[in-house]
Each structure stands twice: as structure tokens, then as C-alpha cells.
Image (cartoon, rainbow, N blue to C red):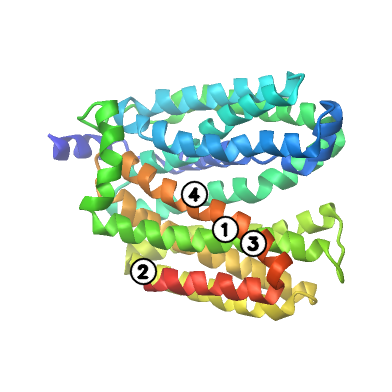
């Protein structure tokens, strides 16, 4: 029955425009967790709260994201994906609108938590694409979606900061809410109508996720690799913000934020990586991507005073890790082509934990050990990922 179900879904393989729309939905969902970060001081003034309290409220976003990875992503295997994704983005729009009108920081924390959970729509989209794409085009199609997720991670802060300065943080959230509402309406119209891919119940699916790591060595290896390089990615970028804010640079937050534009240059690597993964296999693409990222990190340890070299290295660093992510995740989604969401949920949970630890580590490491030592730790994590 499972093979018959896969054959049915293959006839619903999403066309190019549909994949790009799904990539947009993934980018938007991912970006919604970041727009208030550049405006934390404005939020604190508006709500008459301390920076620490607002920071705690914003931290509910990543916590909600973890909950969403575990509870929401598997839904696309159990129920029609077009309905699940549309409902998730619709709830995201409502939560953003409520965040824009809250009157105290605790209510903001609650709505930010819901936003974080629903922002996992990108992982849900990846699961749907992995299920519907033909095997010989799975990585290439996934590369388009990953490009959207990567753009959301990097552009969320940039767009949020610009909008917050122009129309205020409440107006920023309303803009994001409006765009989410439009995408929620569009998803049922463009996502292929398919039957659920999972034969087991939803609760049974959730209970099965921890056991996947026991039964599938490929999942353990992929999750370990992904966690290590996402640790490196988050450690370098969070450490970079600290390093550039201190002497001898003492850059403003706006100038530091512009460094994220270099990361956007690495996004095209996701499409290239997807095509090459389908041709030569995931392992080769992963090693090439990690080699590029590792070499760039080594140079960054000494080249930060030269802005041109630093920006080039940041672009190559992101390109290498984005490429590795496409290849690595394609192996996870192929473990169960009929119902890949629970495997993707398990993978992304470990992946995100690695990134959270990296974010905390990067800022602390720069203050305690300096920038060169931080990049050395980052390089070591990438080397360990290549050996996993």
C-alpha cells in the first residue's frame, strides 16, 4: 500500500511555480521569528518594560519553534498537506496581528511563542516537497525550498529592522501578518491535493520519533552532522556581532546588520547543491560544502579588519553550509519517501538544538577568548561534522 501511495503522490509532483511559491511560504514563515530583534529597545519603551523582559519574551520564539518541530511538522504526513500548511500560516498571521496590539510584555511572550511554533512551516514544506518530488529531482527541488528558508533566516532581521524604523514595530508585525494571510489563502490553491502519507495515527507518529534514531543509523549521522555545522553557523554569526560591536570596530547595530547581506550571496548555492546532489550523491556535496565553509572560517579568524575579505568569506561560509544542508536533508527525506515528515521533524529538532547552543556559545566565546579563538572552535565543529 505504501508503494502505491508513493506512486499516487508522484503524479502530483509540484510544478516549478508551485515549488517557488512554497519556497516563498517557507521563507516568510522562517522570517517571522526574527523581525523584532533589531527593535528590542523600541519594544521595551513602548511596553514600559526592561530590555531583559523583552529579551525573555523574544526567547519564547525559539522555544515555540522547538515545540512546532515536534508537534506540527508531522501533521503533513497525517493530514492533507494543503490544509495543514494553510492553517499553520493562517494561525501565524493571527498571532502576528495579536503581537502587534498587545499591551504588556507577558502577552507578547505568549504570542511570540505561537509565532515560533507556526514558523516551522518551512520544515513542513520541506517534508511535503521531499514526499512529492521525483527521486532523481528531490535534492534539486529541496534546494529551492532551502534557499527560501535560508533567505528567511538572514532577511528577517534586515527587513524587520528597516520596517521597524519606518513604520514602528507594531506596524512591522502587521505587515508580516498581512503577507502571511495572503499566503495562507494561496496555499490551498497551489499545493497539490494528495492523500495523507502516514498510515499510523498522529499520537503514534509522535511516539515513534525518538525511536527513529535507534533504528536508523543514517538519521543519527545526518542529525549529528547537521547539529555540528548549525552550531558553527550560529556561533560564528552571533560571535561576529559581538566582535564588531567592540573596539577597535565599535560598529553600530545597523552597520553590523548589513553584514548579513553577505550571507544572502550564499543562497544560490542551495540550488547548485541540489542539482549536484541528484547527480553525484549527497556525501560528495556535503564534504565540498564543509571544506569551503571551514577554509572560509580559518581566513575569517585573521581577516576581520579587511571588510572586503571578511564579507567574501562570510558569503563562502554560508554558501558551503547551505549546500551541505541541502544534501544532508535530502538523505533524511529519502529514508521514508511516503511519510518523510517525522524523519524531518527528528532531524530538525537535533539540528535546531545545535544552533541554539552555537548562538549562546558564540557571543560568550568572543568575550572570553577573542575572535580568532572563536573561529578556531567553529572550524573544529565543521571538521567534526565532515568526519561524522
User: Could you tell me which secondary element the residue under label 1 belongs to?
Assistant: helix
Q: Which residue is mark 2?
A: 388
User: Could you tell me which secondary element the residue under label 2 belongs to?
Assistant: loop
Q: Is residue 202 left or right of residue 182?
A: left
- Say which label, 2 or 1, has the lower sequence index: 1
Figure quadrant of the N terminus: top left
Residue 274 seen in the figure: no
Q: Which mark is residue 358?
A: 1
- Separation of marks 2 and 3 at Cα, in angstroms: 22 Å
Q: Give the camera-side residue of 142 and 150.
A: 150
User: Could you tell me which secondary element the residue under label 3 belongs to?
Assistant: helix
Residue 349 location, x and y as percent? 43, 46
Q: Which mark is residue 362?
A: 3
Label count reads 4
- Say which label, 1 or 4, has the lower sequence index: 4
2 or 1: mark nearer the eye: 1
3 or 4: mark nearer the eye: 3
2 or 3: mark nearer the eye: 3
- Separation of marks 1 and 4 at Cα, in angstroms: 10 Å
**Residue that appears at 74% across and 40% down:** 160
Amino acid at each position: 500500500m505504501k508503494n502505491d501511495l508513493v506512486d499516487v503522490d508522484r503524479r502530483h509532483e509540484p510544478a516549478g511555480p508551485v515549488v517557488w511559491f512554497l519556497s516563498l511560504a517557507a521563507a516568510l514563515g522562517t522570517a517571522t521569528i526574527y523581525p523584532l530583534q533589531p527593535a528590542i529597545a523600541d519594544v521595551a519603551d513602548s511596553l514600559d518594560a526592561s530590555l531583559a523582559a523583552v529579551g525573555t519574551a523574544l526567547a519564547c520564539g525559539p522555544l515555540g519553534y522547538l515545540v512546532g518541530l515536534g508537534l506540527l511538522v508531522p501533521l503533513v504526513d497525517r493530514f492533507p498537506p494543503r490544509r495543514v500548511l494553510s492553517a499553520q500560516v493562517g494561525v501565524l498571521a493571527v498571532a502576528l496581528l495579536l503581537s502587534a496590539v498587545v499591551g504588556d510584555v507577558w502577552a507578547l511572550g505568549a504570542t511570540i511563542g505561537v509565532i515560533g511554533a507556526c514558523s516551522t512551516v518551512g520544515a513542513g514544506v520541506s517534508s511535503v516537497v521531499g514526499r512529492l518530488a521525483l527521486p532523481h529531482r528531490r535534492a534539486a527541488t529541496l534546494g529551492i525550498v532551502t534557499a527560501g528558508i535560508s533567505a528567511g533566516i538572514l532577511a528577517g532581521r534586515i527587513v524587520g529592522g528597516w520596517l521597524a524604523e519606518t513604520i514602528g514595530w507594531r506596524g512591522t508585525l502587521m505587515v508580516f501578518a498581512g503577507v502571511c494571510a495572503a499566503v495562507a489563502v494561496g496555499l490551498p490553491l497551489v499545493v497539490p491535493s494528495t492523500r495523507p502519507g502516514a498510515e499510523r495515527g498522529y499520537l503514534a507518529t509522535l511516539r515513534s520519533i525518538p525511536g527513529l534514531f535507534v533504528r536508523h543509523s543514517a538519521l543519527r549521522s545526518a542529525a549529528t552532522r547537521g547539529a555540528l555545522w548549525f552550531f558553527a553557523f550560529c556561533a560564528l554569526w552571533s560571535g561576529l556581532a559581538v566582535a564588531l560591536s567592540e573596539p577597535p570596530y565599535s560598529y553600530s547595530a545597523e552597520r553590523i546588520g548589513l553584514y548579513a547581506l553577505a550571507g544572502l550571496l550564499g543562497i544560490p548555492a542551495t540550488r547548485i547543491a541540489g542539482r549536484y546532489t541528484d547527480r553525484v550523491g549527497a556525501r560528495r556535496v556535503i564534504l565540498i560544502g564543509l571544506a569551503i565553509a571551514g577554509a572560509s572560517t580559518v581566513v575569517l579568524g585573521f581577516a576581520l579588519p579587511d571588510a572586503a575579505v571578511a564579507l567574501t568569506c562570510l558569503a563562502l561560509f554560508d554558501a558551503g553550509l547551505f549546500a551541505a544542508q541541502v544534501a544532508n536533508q535530502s538523505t533524511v527525506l529519502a529514508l521514508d519517501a511516503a511519510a518523510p515528515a517525522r524523519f524531518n521533524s527528528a532531524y530538525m529538532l537535533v539540528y535546531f538544538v545545535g544552533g541554539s547552543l552555537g548562538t549562546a556559545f558564540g557571543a560568550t566565546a568572543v568575550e572570553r577568548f577573542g575572535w580568532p579563538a572563536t573561529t578556531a572552535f567553529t572550524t573544529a565543529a565543521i571538521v567534526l561534522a565532515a568526519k561524522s
